[in-house]
Amino acid sequence: MKILFKTLRSIIYLLLIGSAVQVSIAQSSVNNTECIQCHDKHVSTDAYNKSVHKSLMCSACHVKDEANTVDKLLKGKNTCVVSYKPMNCATCHSSVSKEHETSIHNSERLPVPCSKCHSDIHKITSIKNDKKASALLCSQCHEKESPYFKSIHFQALEKGNNDAPTCTDCHNKHAISKIDNISEGRSFHTQACMKCHADSKMMTNSNVTTIAPKTYFESYHGKNIRLGYPEKVAGCADCHSSHSILPAKDTNSTVNSANLTNTCKQCHVNAGTGFSKFIAHAEPNNSEKYPLLFWVTLFMNGLLAGTFLFFWIHSLLWVFRGFVEKKQNRNARDFSGDELRTGNAVKIKHKVYRRFRPIHITLHIFVVTSFLALALTGLPLKFNYTSWGKTLMDFLGGVSSAGIIHRIAAIVTFGYFIATLVMSIRFLFSKKTSKQTFFQRLFGPDSLFINRKDLSDIMAMFRWFFFRGPKPAFDRWTYWEKFDFLAVFWGVAIIGSSGLVLWFPEFFSYFLPGWIFNMATIIHSDEALLATGFIFTVHFFNTHLRVEKFPMDFVIFNGQVTEKEMLHERSEQWKRYKDQGITEKYEVKKPTPIVWDIALRLFGLMAVLIGSVLAVLIFYSIIGSGLH
């Protein structure tokens, strides 16, 4: 009996549950039917059953407002029997709603509710993956952007290429950002394009070149974007337009040769026809398309590699040989018990002589200051893809501030270059300075020009490196000092001339061809890297960091050298001065003031420290990511 009773009870419960479900379904069905009976003029049953909402009951969107009931007197008078809360699409579309909350379409300036685009919720059909329908929907409000329908993008869509972008590919569907002329908005002009054009697989499928993103970020415009200052430069859309994008061969295209100068004039107001001939997306490594740029790049790379290879090997050999010599001299002093004399067995007196005049010291201070300023403001652009590059640029106050500093330093550089050129001309041609002929002055021991002795000194130095002979005896200038001096002439001439072209492109565009600007960019960048790398490694080692001079040779800041240093490092100059009887002419009677001495030492040490840190950052970046 107990089993029978439990069975009957289970059946009764199931019947009750089934009845409740049927009643609920029946009530819902009745409620939907009741809605249609009154709203049949506004809602088509057929259209609703074909819409994306066909599976929903009316009450899914029209929720009863239990707090506001309808007056009983109104019931039965063609009025809804209940009140309803305002429709809230977020009930079902929560993620979309969150995107819309921060959208420009939810701003005070441009309030666009869901119903503006999704006008009738009872007839809505899906346009998912229908890019043409999306564009038509947007164009109902954005009539000014109608040129899109004649663009290469829309033409591709009509041909069946679904990779071609429509409005929502660039602007998103609901999370639509404000586009303005401040940093975030300006970056959109480039980032929106990069979504597709940086996708090599997509571009290959669409038969579109993939070189544009790479070459853009190698340009001044692209480097500024990476550094976080897009508001200062042109993005993709500024040249190619935002919506009316057409092939370059199309006469209506903004980048058509007939229209390109006017396109450039949007930013570069005084640009000439040569300005628009600049090759915006040039490939310097492509010898077939750009042979001139290819050979310039190859030459600069060879110059970089050859210079660094020779002098780095030279420095490394010197590190080892200098350490050995210092150790040998110390052992001879500490263990031999003999009186230490120079190689010429001359007893050293404690005297100080003048090596550099005040004009030389002053010029060198200008050289150091301007060179560091140029390096600090230029290297962030060269290494724009690094975190330290962006940090340094931000520290300098941004690209505008860095540009001002860079140009001031360039003016100082031209100043000391001209002063040095005048001094060199005076040295070579003035009869007041010497009675020697031009060639005697040019190749003489006081000249900074290369002569035969320098070649023999180089060979002798390498023999000394390998313990094959004594260290050569030098005169007033060593071969590495001459190289430093002549490199300034080469560097200022090359970096300076290319820098002027890039500084005043609009002026030079009236009489120079556009490809000159591409060449100037390559030369200026690579020669600057050569200069900074050489100064911060080779020059610093030769002058300050080698064993004999570490941590710094102060002679360039006070102009003085001891007799011991003269005999050890420039014995031939000392012998020549002795033979001529002019040593007293160069003898210094009073030391430099202590305040001046301390100030310049701190200045010199700071310069060496800054340069060394920059050298480490350069090497770290090149090894980690290469040159971009």
Image (cartoon, rainbow, N blue to C red):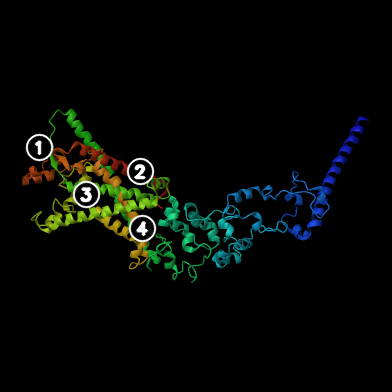
The quadrant in which residue 128 appears is bottom right
The residue identified by callout 3 is 363
Helix, strand or loop at label 2? It is: helix
Between circles 2 and 1, the one closer to the viewer is 2
Q: Name the residue at 34% across, 54% down.
A: 526
Question: Which mark, residue 522?
Answer: 4
Residue 136's spot in the image, x, y percent?
Answer: 62, 63
Say which of 282 and 33 sits in front: 33
Helix, strand or loop at label 4? It is: helix
Q: Could you tell me the amino acid type at mark 1?
A: Val
Give the Cα separation between the discs numbered 3 and 4. 29 Å
Question: Which mark, residue 80?
Answer: none
Between circles 3 and 1, the one closer to the viewer is 3
Q: Could you tell me the amino acid type at mark 2?
A: Val
The residue identified by callout 1 is 346
Residue 248's spot in the image, x, y percent?
Answer: 48, 68
Position of the N terminus, as image quadrant, is top right
Give the Cα separation between the discs numbered 2 and 1. 43 Å
Observer able to see residue 30: yes
